[in-house]
Image (cartoon, coloured by chain):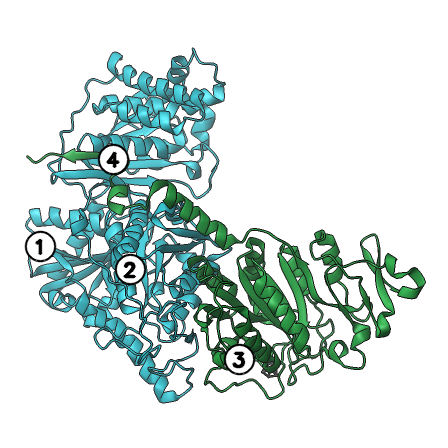
């Protein structure tokens, strides 16, 4: 069954399992789970056609809490396992749930190659900027100078910008949302589900045990309008209370201006299909120098790897007929030894 | 050199001789020419009787340069014929090869029959009419040499001429020069009088039937395609290029119309990860590699053991440890296959004995994987992977059946509910309504498959996984014993040493020694008859290309004082060295008593 064809009467409850959810009370993962359980029944996909593949880490427990097919694999390797599943079963809707350590440290290689190939997977990266399951070491997205158990003097490595890494891999769909923005997250998940090809979604996720408040500046009700640059295709890049601030580009560099000073017509307009350099400029915008872009940065059309692979199979079978081993063995140079 | 070697081989097979080959080439793609390290060789033994090995000591050597002569000289039989490209024996090349004096003049070759042929000059002369550059003409000299060998052994040129036409279809100038050189070499043999005679090797008395020539890697690829067809499922290969396994990836990527999906992954881990993902999806999951790749895959193999999905890991062994000897053969990954993972992680192991046996071993690996829902190791090695032999093609009826069954009934379903006979859990394809379930690397509760940290459940599951693999012993044939059922000495081997061990046993039996040969194809679990066989012989020796890995297993499993015959030189056993060492063991025994 194709993704769009079936109308299903599924509800959120159909996607809950009988397993006790074992995340720490207050963990941002609960909110993300709730939104995914809300979105899945709305996608028109039969429940049995969902598969969720994860690696290792707090976020990677996710499959156990979703009543779909699920595979909790090994650290960093979920994109590889999910690629094999999708290649063998293109009709499935395959989701990868991963974290900043899982996807960007131990599994960095698989992530970039999966995005480069554009395998039709929906990849949700729960970014809490810390190692939670191993109890609080700094991660590849932790800020420079981060004090943790393994960096008592402060970390001296520069973090990754996950979205920049994805864009650098020529990902066809790149977006960001947050655990505490349920409405926004729901919309982004819908967009990701509809995208044909790799859809990469970074979800800011609060780890209230080891890195509490890492994204408070983004999600805090009072300040968020000044911090979030909510992206909408074809709309100007404006933010702040009363949308008074906007972004203009000096060459490749975004700059914050007062809309009143330059006029709304001079504010840059968001384009999900713009050249990569524009999306890269957005992905490199970091608080407090810049507001934080939220939403779909990039959505372009590019053939999905699994479709191309399966198309080679089906067209070759159509042309040559399904091969038979007994014939294959007898092709090329053979000779007969006659009975004596 | 490898091309001309395999041409000689296929023509020889076509005229009905039995044969075995040993390609031997450097790890570097363009190793410095003229040095010992750069020598690329191809050894073939053929004859009118059954041939088990490429031979110990060649009777004929074609040395294209001094380095090749230097490298092979020590191996030649006394009185052997050496055909030398005299054009290549200038002072500089002789020195580069490490000869002190000129071997053609200083008596080094005294005990051989030496024929000096100016191969390069003759090749150039035969190509005078063409407009090729000097360098391009040089390249054709191997075909000149091949033509000469065809004359010497009375082989027809047609097969190679057709092949040259196909191979160089896109560069007709090379097709022409190589054909000319091949014919010129043959005619050189006909017209010159430097060889006093040529040889006739009559057809071997081999079983009637339809034959083809096959290398181990090709047979491996065909075996997995056959296994997929027998199971009614599609084959999925996840692989990362590595010597000497890459040819299986190349071969399988050609067969899209067999429904074979090949995924050249970003690394060894992704290769097995994708294969396991495809197995979850209901395909025959396969990953092909060599020892260093297995190191990287071990975590994923353990995941496959834990989630109990069918998967085949093919290790085409090479010299180790680490990067080791990439193009040379060795059997030192047996214990890696058996034990190289964390935790109690039992896994079935199948080892192919000859190039063509790779076909059947691959099918057997898939049969066990699917029936018992387990990853399986398929072991081959560089020697049989690249070596070729004539193969009597099997009929469809000779192939086993593989019954792959997906569970679809939701009623009474549990992910870890086991089949009481095999202890296998059900295989459920995602997309099956009502059977949604989760699997993963955390310990599972018996039957329900839910995550469980319960200590007694863990022990129970560890034992169940072990029992499942041990139980396969009832489902595999007895190990084949060659020779009498009891005797003075039993020679045990496994994998690609089969030919040498069998030939050594045959020759010793002819000399009256009470020796039998037991060759193991199933290494885990071991066939049931091994214990009985071992008890029926005075001495047990285990010959393998490592420092004694099967030996350790035999000693610990059967509490027997087995003796190892071991070699780790990147080269297969010679029949003569086996005979020598087995005889020494027998004599030692007498002295000891
Ligand atoms: S450690 Fe942090 S990320 Fe992990 S479950 Fe607890 S709160 Fe969530």
The disc at residue B58 is 4
Residue B318 position within the rendered picture, expressed as x and y whole percent measured from the top left: 37, 52
Colour given to chain A in the rendered image: green
Question: Nearer the observer, disc 2 or disc 4?
Answer: 2
Residue B536 position within the rendered picture, expressed as x and y whole percent measured from the top left: 9, 65
| Residue that badge 3 annotates | A12
Q: Is residue B87 above or below residue B432?
A: above
Near-viewer residue (A195 or B452) = A195
Label 3, label 1: how far apart the Cα atoms are: 69 Å
Chain letter of the residue carrying label 3: A
Q: Is residue B449 left or right of residue B205?
A: right
Does mark 3 fall on the same chain as mark 4?
Answer: no
Q: Does the CB distance between marks 2 and 4 fall below 8 Å?
A: no
Label 2, label 4: how far apart the Cα atoms are: 38 Å
Q: Does the CB distance between marks 3 and 1 fall below 8 Å?
A: no
Compare marks 2 and 1 and give the one earlier in the sequence: 2
The disc at residue A90 is none
Residue B377 appears in which quarter of the rendering? bottom left
| Residue that badge 2 annotates | B366
Compare marks 2 and 4 and give the one earlier in the sequence: 4
Colour given to chain B in the rendered image: cyan
């Amino acid at each position: 069954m194709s993704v769009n064809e079936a109308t299903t009467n599924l509800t959120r409850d159909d996607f809950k399992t009988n397993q006790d959810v074992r995340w720490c009370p207050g963990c941002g993962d609960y909110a993300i789970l709730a939104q995914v359980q809300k979105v899945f029944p709305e996608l028109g996909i039969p429940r049995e056609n969902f598969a969720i593949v994860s690696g290792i880490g707090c976020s990677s427990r996710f499959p156990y809490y979703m009543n779909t097919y699920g595979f909790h694999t090994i650290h960093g390797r979920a994109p590889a396992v999910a690629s094999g599943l999708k290649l063998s079963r293109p009709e499935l809707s395959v989701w990868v749930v991963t974290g900043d350590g899982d996807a960007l440290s131990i599994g960095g290689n698989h992530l970039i190659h999966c995005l480069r190939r554009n395998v039709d997977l929906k990849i949700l990266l729960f970014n809490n900027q810390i190692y939670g399951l191993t109890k609080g070491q700094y991660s590849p997205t932790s800020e420079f100078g981060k004090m943790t158990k393994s960096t008592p003097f402060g970390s001296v490595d520069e973090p990754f910008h996950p979205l920049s890494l994805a864009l650098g891999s020529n990902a066809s769909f790149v977006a960001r949302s947050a655990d505490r923005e349920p409405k926004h997250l729901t919309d982004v998940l819908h967009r990701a589900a509809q995208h044909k090809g790799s859809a990469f979604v970074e979800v800011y996720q609060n780890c209230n045990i080891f890195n509490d408040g890492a994204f408070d500046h983004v999600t805090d009700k009072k300040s968020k309008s000044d911090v979030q640059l909510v992206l909408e295709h074809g709309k100007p890049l404006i933010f702040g209370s009363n949308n008074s601030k906007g972004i203009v580009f000096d060459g490749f560099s975004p700059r914050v201006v007062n809309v009143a000073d330059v006029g709304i017509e001079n504010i840059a307009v968001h384009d999900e299909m713009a050249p990569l350099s524009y999306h890269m400029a957005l992905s490199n915008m970091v608080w407090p120098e810049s507001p934080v872009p939220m939403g779909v940065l990039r959505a372009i059309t590019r053939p999905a790897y699994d479709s191309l692979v399966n198309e080679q199979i089906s067209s070759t079978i159509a042309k040559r007929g399904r091969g038979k081993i007994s014939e294959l063995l007898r092709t090329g140079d053979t000779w007969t030894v006659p009975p004596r | 050199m490898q091309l001309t070697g395999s041409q000689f081989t296929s023509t020889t097979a076509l005229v009905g001789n039995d044969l075995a080959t040993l390609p031997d080439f450097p790890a570097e793609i363009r190793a410095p020419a003229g040095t010992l390290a750069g020598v690329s060789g191809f050894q073939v033994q053929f004859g009118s009787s059954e041939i088990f090995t490429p031979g110990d000591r060649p009777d004929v050597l074609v040395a294209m340069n001094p380095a090749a002569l230097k490298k092979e000289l020590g191996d030649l039989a006394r009185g052997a014929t050496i055909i030398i490209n005299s054009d290549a024996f200038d002072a500089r090349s002789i020195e580069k090869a490490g000869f002190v004096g000129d071997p053609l003049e200083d008596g080094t070759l005294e005990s051989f029959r030496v024929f000096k042929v100016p191969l390069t000059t003759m090749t150039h002369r035969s190509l005078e009419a063409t407009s090729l550059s000097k360098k391009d003409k040089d390249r054709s000299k191997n075909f000149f040499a091949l033509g000469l060998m065809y004359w010497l052994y009375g082989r027809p040129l047609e097969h190679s001429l057709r092949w040259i036409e196909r191979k160089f279809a896109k560069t007709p100038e090379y097709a022409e020069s190589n054909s000319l050189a091949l014919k010129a070499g043959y005619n050189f043999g006909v017209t010159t009088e430097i060889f006093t005679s040529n040889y006739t090797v009559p057809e071997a008395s081999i079983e009637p039937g339809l034959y083809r020539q096959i290398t181990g890697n090709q047979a491996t690829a065909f075996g997995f395609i056959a296994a997929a067809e027998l199971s009614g499922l599609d084959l999925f290969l996840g692989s990362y290029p590595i010597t000497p396994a890459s040819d299986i990836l190349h071969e399988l990527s050609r067969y899209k119309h067999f429904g074979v999906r090949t995924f050249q992954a970003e690394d060894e881990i992704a290769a097995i990860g994708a294969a396991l993902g495809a197995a979850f999806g209901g395909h025959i999951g396969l990953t092909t590699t060599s020892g260093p790749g297995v190191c990287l895959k071990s975590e994923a193999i353990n995941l496959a053991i834990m989630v109990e999905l069918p998967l085949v890991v093919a290790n085409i062994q090479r010299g180790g440890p680490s990067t080791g000897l990439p193009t040379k053969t060795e059997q030192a990954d047996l214990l890696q296959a058996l034990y190289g993972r964390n935790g109690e992680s039992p896994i079935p192991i199948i080892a192919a004995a000859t190039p063509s046996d790779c076909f059947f071993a691959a099918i057997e690996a898939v049969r066990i994987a699917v029936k018992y829902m387990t990853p399986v190791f398929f072991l081959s090695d560089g020697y049989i992977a690249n070596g070729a032999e004539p193969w009597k093609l099997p009929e469809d009826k000779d192939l086993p059946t593989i019954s792959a069954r997906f569970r679809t009934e939701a009623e009474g379903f549990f992910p870890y509910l086991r089949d009481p006979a095999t202890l296998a859990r059900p295989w459920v394809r995602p997309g099956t309504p009502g059977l949604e379930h989760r699997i993963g690397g955390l310990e599972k509760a018996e039957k329900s498959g839910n995550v469980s940290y319960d200590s007694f459940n863990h022990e129970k599951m560890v034992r169940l996984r072990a029992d499942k693999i041990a139980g396969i012993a009832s489902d595999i044939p007895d190990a084949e014993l060659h020779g009498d059922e009891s005797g003075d000495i039993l020679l045990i081997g496994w994998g690609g040493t089969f030919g040498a061990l069998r030939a050594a046993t045959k020759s010793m039996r002819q000399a009256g020694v009470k020796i039998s040969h037991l060759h193991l194809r199933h290494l885990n679990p071991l066939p049931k008859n091994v214990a009985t066989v071992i008890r029926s012989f005075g001495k047990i020796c285990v010959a393998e290309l490592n420092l004694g890995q099967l030996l350790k297993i035999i000693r610990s499993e059967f509490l027997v004082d087995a003796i190892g015959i071991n070699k780790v030189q990147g080269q297969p056993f010679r029949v003569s060295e086996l005979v020598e060492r087995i005889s020494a063991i027998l004599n030692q025994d007498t002295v000891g008593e």
